[in-house]
Amino acid sequence: MRYHGGVPRPEEAGGTAVPEGPPVAEVPPDQSRHDHHDATVWAEGARTGIPHPCHLRIRRERNCGMRLLVTDTTWNIAGLAHALRGEGFYITEAGNAAEALDFAEAGEQDAFLIDPDVPDMAAAALVAQLRAQYPKTVICVVSRRVTEADRAHFLTRGADAMIEWPAKAVEVAAQIRAYVRRAAGFAHPEIAIGPVTIDVARMTVLNGDMPIHLTRLEYELVEMLALRNGTMVTREQLMLQLYAWQDEPDPKIIDVYICRIRAKLAAAGVAQEVIQTSFGQGVRMPVLGRAVLEEVAA
């Protein structure tokens, strides 16, 4: 009854149907249980001009974005994983250090959350190995009690922070998002891509003041490209981020998502090509602020 990564279905998360009437900057429908199937159906409808019946109702669904790999070995961190799902993160759970290393290699992750009580390896050694393999990925150690000696030990081995849990989930979520954003080189949560603003704290996409409603996978694709700070992202990397080896469709689905996002941007009045593709290389979103755009236009 859940999406991959433990994300609840819209009705389980309290999603509600949007009232009848013209949608705001909305072209295709929001996320269905199988987003790649929905994308294919929408593409066929766009080609033929005949809308699919499921497109007549538009659901409002909370966007999800960053993907976290959690070593879920105690009740304490299991509670944190559950709380962070509620805050809009994708969660991949590993039962031990070996699984964590395998999952880290198999799928793109924005951050690692490590339990000090992993059963098959010293947690500090796991942190050091992850840091050596993924030098730019955020690593946080989560513990019920954090001492000065523990903090110094884990920070020395490569952790970015130690998080004390239980705590307020919204604060921990904001802390993790800030670490990920800063690791990508952004000082503020609002990332300007030409006229479009991606707010990674609120998980929203705006053209000026107009919200652009994206499905969960569309938003994750946009957020990933934005956090890459203008660098090229291969389709393989996008597939690993969106699906993390679970129920993975044909890689051509990325082209469907990009087409769908571009259609929504155009419907919102975005004339600039925000998402750029390069044959054989990948996809990128050039980080170009409004002031730079005005200077270029002049």
Image (cartoon, rainbow, N blue to C red):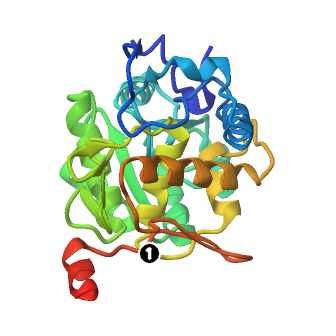
- Viewer can see residue 21: yes
Q: To which quarter of the image does residue 139 belong?
A: bottom left
Q: Position of residue 17 (x, y in %)?
A: 42, 13
Vertically, is 136 above or below 165? below
Vertically, is 71 above or below 252? above
Residue name at image x 44 percent, y 75 percent: 230
162 or 18: nearer the eye? 18
Residue name at image x 65 percent, y 68 percent: 234
Residue farthest right in this picture = 250
Asked whether, in this view, residue 257 is left or right of residue 20, the answer is: right
Quarter of the image with the C terminus in it: bottom left
Q: Position of residue 103 (x, y in %)?
A: 65, 48
Asked whether, in this view, residue 153 is left or right of residue 35, the answer is: left
Q: Position of residue 24 (x, y in %)?
A: 35, 34
Quarter of the image with the N terminus in it: top right
Residue name at image x 40 percent, y 66 percent: 158
- Residue position marked by numbered label 1 in the rendering: 230
Secondary element type, mark 1: loop
Residue type marked 1: Gly
